[in-house]
Amino acid sequence: MTRSLELGSLRLALILDARGTIEGDRVFHPAAPQEWSQGLSPDPSGNLPVEVNGLLISEGNAHTLVDTGFGEEERPEREENLLKSLSAIGIRPRDISRVILTHAHGDHCLGNTLLRQGRWLPTFPLAEYIVQEREIAGMRAKGEEIWQTRFQPLAERKQLRLIDGETELSATLACWPTPGHTAGHQSVLVRSGGQQALVLGDLAVLALNMQRPEWGPGWAWSFELDVRNRRRIAEWAAAEDAVLIAPHDPEWPVFRMIRASDGLRVAPSEG
């Protein structure tokens, strides 16, 4: 199981925040259990292991984090969390200069802020937080709690950057809109040394979602658009020999797509 890889001058590392399980029927809707379970090991209730991971992208002493996990408030009893995992590899919150949020579901953004003496403060005090405008527009307009506690404190400190569509952040990083799971879902393109990797967020909860793009989370904002973007990205990855990263998948978090007689298939990454 690959937990980190070198990509040109960059080092990419999965940063564990939580472990758990999820119903296979929900991840691979509308497939029947006898279809999606082939090659997998669900428990007797049809649940599959999943992880919540951030992805740390490092170039020397410059560090970008993709997604912030559950934070302190959700499942506080868990042994692991993002900040502990970062600390274990010598990274402090103030070492993170950029945070990219794939979308605004709790397991990807509740770690944006910390509650201290009744105030919500940025977890990463020196970071610019980047999210698609479309992802937070509705919650901001309604004044939803997740906006008030996880995004508004960033905006008030001028640490929140809202983008609209495909955006180049640097020579090595870009945000690609991949809506469907949510209205403003984005994936993160990483490029260095002639190599490419794409952080999928929840475009694929598990690697098998990319091999069977017609199977996906039944709770998607637009299932049709979610399927369409999985197909598009799978084709792109095969054509470009790009690495794909599925941060929820504990067994195949880093993989490639290859062409076979029966279509595109997931294959190990040699990165």
Image: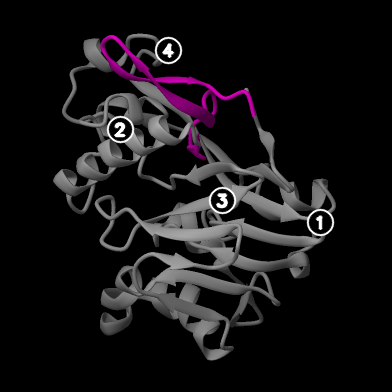
State yes or no: discs 1 and 4 in contact (Cβ < 8 Å): no
Q: Distance between the Cα atoms at labels 1 and 2?
A: 37 Å
Q: Is residue 219 visible?
A: no
Packing grade of label 2 (10 A; few <14, some 14-19, many >=20) is many
Residue assigned mark 3 = 190
Q: Is residue 217 magenta?
A: no
Q: Quadrant of the N terminus?
A: top right
Q: Distance between the Cα atoms at labels 4 and 3?
A: 31 Å
Q: Quadrant of the C terminus?
A: top right
State yes or no: discs 1 and 2 in contact (Cβ < 8 Å): no
Between label 4 and label 3, give the one nearer the viewer: 3
Q: Pick whichever of labels 1 and 3 is earlier in the sequence.
A: 1
Quadrant of res 270? top right
* Amino acid tagged 1: Gly
Q: Is 252 located above or below residue 81 in the figure?
A: above
Relative image position of residue 65 (x, y in whole percent): 62, 58
Q: Is 157 located above or below residue 192 in the figure?
A: below
State yes or no: discs 4 and 3 in contact (Cβ < 8 Å): no
Q: Pick whichever of labels 1 and 2 is earlier in the sequence.
A: 2
Q: Is residue 250 visible?
A: yes
Q: Secondary structure at mark 3?
A: strand
Residue assigned mark 1 = 60
Residue assigned mark 2 = 27
Task: Give me the disc on residue 41.
Answer: 4
Q: Which residues are drawn in magenta?
A: 243-271
Q: Residue at x 80, y 56 (%)?
A: 91
Q: Is residue 269 magenta?
A: yes
* Amino acid tagged 3: Val
Between label 1 and label 4, give the one nearer the viewer: 1
Q: Pick whichever of labels 1 and 4 is earlier in the sequence.
A: 4
* Amino acid tagged 4: Ser
Q: Residue at x 27, y 25 (%)?
A: 212
